[in-house]
Image (spheres, rainbow, N blue to C red):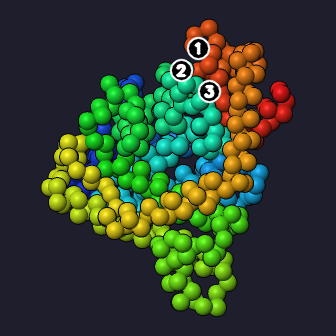
Amino acid sequence: MVSPEKRIEKFEENILASYASFSSKTRGRHYPISEHPLRTVYQRDRDRVIHSAAFRRMEYKTQVFVNHEGDHYRTRLTHTIEVAQISRTIARALGLNEDLAEAIACVHDLGHTPFGHSGEDVLDGLMRDFGGFNHNHQSLRVVDFLERRYPDYPGLNLTYEVREGIAKHESTAEPIYPDVFPPDEKPTLEASLVDLADSIAYNSHDVDDGLSSGILDWESLDEVPILAAARENSIGRYPALHRKYHQYAIIRTLVDEQVTDLINQTGDNIKINNINSLDDVRHAKAELVSFSDETKGKLQPLKNFLNQKMYRHPWMEANASEAQTIIETLFKIYLDDPYKLHGKYKLRLDKEPVEKIICDFIAGMTDRYAQKMFEELR
């Protein structure tokens, strides 16, 4: 009898495009293990991530709004789920491996600090003399070292392809472990699409949360052509509808337009560049997963709008200032007395630089836990 794992692998061979990442052709894991008879390697990776403590902690980590500001705003966890959903849609339409795309989407933000990018900026400054801080690098550190769930090895022991998806999540970032993930070798298409699915999610849903919070006002949408067109379309179809439902329609339209354009343009790129295998993908000279030039032109004003009207809003800057105070204070307290660190972190004190241990501890905190420690220790 053929095992479910092998049956799924055979299904992949029949249904996936020739340039997809096949589970049976993975580059494997750092620590060899017997694979599961019911799941492919990428399904197993996804499950390992979802069952990790770092994944659960994202429920109380800031996406844009700090957790205590409201139950309806997105958290780092709900954002991750949205990225995974968008990634699966794109992967399926392009004949790519949905399980690999989902695994990379689920893991891509595990290394984020409390208080969102504000927290990351603070830790980067504090760690400047020790290599700085980058959430992608930290995500890889989480799955390779900090998560301890198995007796035979550290970390989650994920496949090369999922770990590569973390290391190469942002194409403009400094290479991470270039000796392991060669910078001149392109990542899988599944990894590349997650990068853009991430931007689709936060560009669209930050508008949604911004409107719900009152930081963005309804009339300001007309400053951005892509938002103005979506708003006009919704009002034209349903003139008597409550504004809140028009807001939902605008966000749906924004996501749908980006996803559709990305799928169509990527399909064209694959054809134009004669991509027929994963090896072709890895050595392609051109950008394969991309929006059309027209959509890129529409999205830039949206990014500028969010940066000016939302991310630099006095409310956001006040939150950033609070995050800086909390993280800098905690860092100093633990540096002055490392034995105030908890559990497993204290056990590392004679093995690693104390600054790195403190950085790992603070980066793993949720917003509310960081606030709790700040109140207790200051």
Query: What's under tag 2, amino acid-wise?
Result: Phe
For the residues labelled 1 and 2, say whether their Cβ atoms are less than 8 Å apart: yes
Circle 2 is placed at which residue position? 130
Front position among marks 1 and 2: 2
Q: Nearer the viewer, residue 169 or 29?
A: 169
In the rendered image, which quarter is residue 221 located in?
bottom right
- Which numbered disc, 3 or 1, marks the residue that appears first in the sequence? 3
Q: Secondary structure at mark 3?
A: helix
Q: Quadrant of residue 148?
A: top right
The secondary structure type at the circle numbered 1 is loop
Tally of numbered discs: 3
The residue under label 3 is 126
In this rendering, is residue 4 above or below 206?
A: above
Query: Distance of mark 1 from mark 2, alpha carbons?
Result: 9 Å
Q: In the rendering, at what x and y percent does residue 315 appear?
A: 72, 54
Residue 352 located left or right of residue 316: left
Say which amino acid is labelled 3: Leu
User: Residue at 22% across / 57% down in the picture?
Assistant: 270
**Residue 244 spot, x, y in % from top left:** 66, 77
**Mark 2 secondary-structure assignment:** helix
Few, some or many residues within 10 Å of mark 1 (<14, 14–19, 20+): few
The residue wearing badge 1 is 353
The residue sitting at 83% across, 26% down in the picture is 377
The kind of residue tagged 1 is Pro
Position of 202 relative to 261 (above/below): above
Cα gap from disc 3 to disc 1, whole angstroms: 14 Å
Q: Is residue 131 above or below residue 200?
A: above
